[in-house]
Image (cartoon, grey):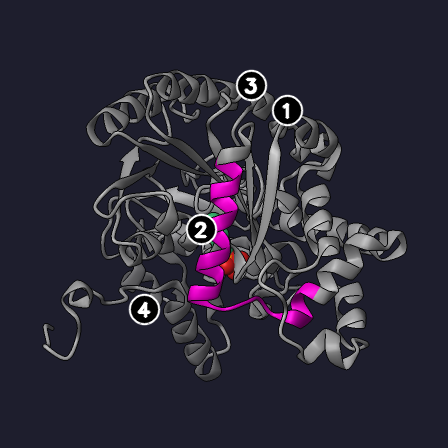
Amino acid sequence: MNNEIVGKHAQHKKLESNILQISQEAKAMKKKYSDVIDATVGMLHHENGKVFSYQVVSDLLHHLSDPETYHYASVRGTKKFSDGVFNWVFGKYADTLKEQFKCSIIPTTGGSGAISNTFYNFNDFGQKVLIPNHYWSPYKNFAMEANIDLETFLMYDENFNFNEEDFKEKAFKLAKEQGRLCLLINDPCNNPTGLSMTIDNWKQIIKTLNVIKKTGVPVILIHDIAYIDYQMQSTELSRDVFSTFTELDSEILVVVIFSGSKTFSLYGFRVGAQIGLSKSQEVIDHFTRVGDYSVRGRFSSVSQPGMSVIEKIFSDQEYKQRFESELVIGRKLLQDRAKLFMEAAEENNLQTLPYKGGFFISILTENKNIFRDLVNDRVFIIPMRGLVRVALSALNIKDIPELVKKIKKHI
Ligand SMILES: Cc1ncc(COP(=O)(O)O)c(C=O)c1O
């Protein structure tokens, strides 16, 4: 694999079992056989197989002016965009957080750009970011690209609740070893497990971070909320977790990762944001300084049409209400599929991880060949370490009973 034309630091690079590649393989097979079941990709689809695009998003996209479509966006985006994202993400807690924290919003190329920039700027080369052992595999790519690595703790205890004990132990250990703690939590509606943590879990995490901060090491909490709008409860309730942030120690930096791809089905537009929060103005000034630099240095600025649409929805009550009512329909699609999947899984004695919302349900398995076994049965799901991930987002409801039977057969 090594070749001197490639720089030394890039010799290890090889994209393995990439989710998007597997999804292409599924699409190619679907052209040949009509009974292929494709539960791979994290894009919400209607039952008719078309992507769940929001009507209000499409209407606005098709009526953008030339500057709103073609001009370069500024590095920082517009005030309407950043205020809109902030208020949407934090909902009823937005005012409290604005009062208690200094904030800064940096538009990025999707949530991916936001995570990638954060990994790069808030770790020394060779350090590790702490994450749960079940995780969205591109985190590893973002880490490698930033010359860092990942360290894991067990996501679940023996009762399939969030494992506060293991988190605490690994957090203290890593902070001591490297003089820094950068923690990434994807919640609610975790990809791949479907876990949504409780308010109490969050309180415990924050308590631990505060104790570690007091030992004098920098503490960064990356909170990836990509699927927050697809939790199986209303938008208001899904924001309750932010009530715990007020307990954070003054020097801690929180970076909330917003994904325009998931919230608005604007997958191809590559819009997201890094939302920096800290009680320290100095910390936020540094967050903004390095964030602006990385946007310019890595991708210059974000998709103008994508940001224009998001800004319009967030700053107009009528558009926002239309969006919110469509979101209820999107969530209902997932809810119906999840309900049927769980019922069929129970009938077939298939052990799923507890599903609390989002695009995915997972099943633990030790069968390393399960991916190919299922492909031979014309079923595509995503294999990850110790589990298989089923994308409810891409599934057709009528395929669920057959899918569950086939997974059961090979697991
Ligand atoms: C957990 C998680 N975070 C972040 C993202 C980022 O998505 P995007 O870069 O399209 O905003 C994804 C996309 O699949 C995801 O699953």
What secondary structure do most residues of the magenta stretch adopt?
helix
- Residue under numbered circle 3: 247
Q: Which residues are magenta?
A: 283-307
Picture residue at 72% right of the left edge, 42% below the top: 87
Q: Secondary structure at mark 4?
A: helix
Is residue 298 found inside the magenta-colored segment of the image? yes
- Residue under numbered circle 4: 376
Of badges 1 and 2, the one in the foreground is: 2
User: Which mark is first along the chain, 2 or 1?
Assistant: 1
User: Which mark is first along the chain, 2 or 4?
Assistant: 2
CA distance separating discs 3 and 4 = 51 Å
Of badges 4 and 2, the one in the foreground is: 2
Which amino acid does the dot numbered 4 rest on?
Asn
Spot occupied by residue 229 in the image (x, y as percentages of width and height): 65, 45
Picture residue at 29% right of the left edge, 36% below the top: 152
Spot occupied by residue 63 in the image (x, y as percentages of width and height): 81, 76
Picture residue at 74% right of the left edge, 59% below the top: 311
Of badges 4 and 1, the one in the foreground is: 1
320, 234: nearer the viewer: 320
Residue 395 in view: no
Q: Secondary structure at mark 3?
A: helix
Mark drawn on residue 243: 1
Above or below — where is 184 with respect to 201?
Answer: below
234, 301: nearer the viewer: 301
Badge 3 residue CB within 8 Å of ligand 1: no
Q: Are marks 3 and 2 in contact (CB under 8 Å)?
A: no
CA distance separating discs 4 and 2 = 48 Å
- Residue under numbered circle 2: 290
Left or right: residue 311 compared with residue 167? right
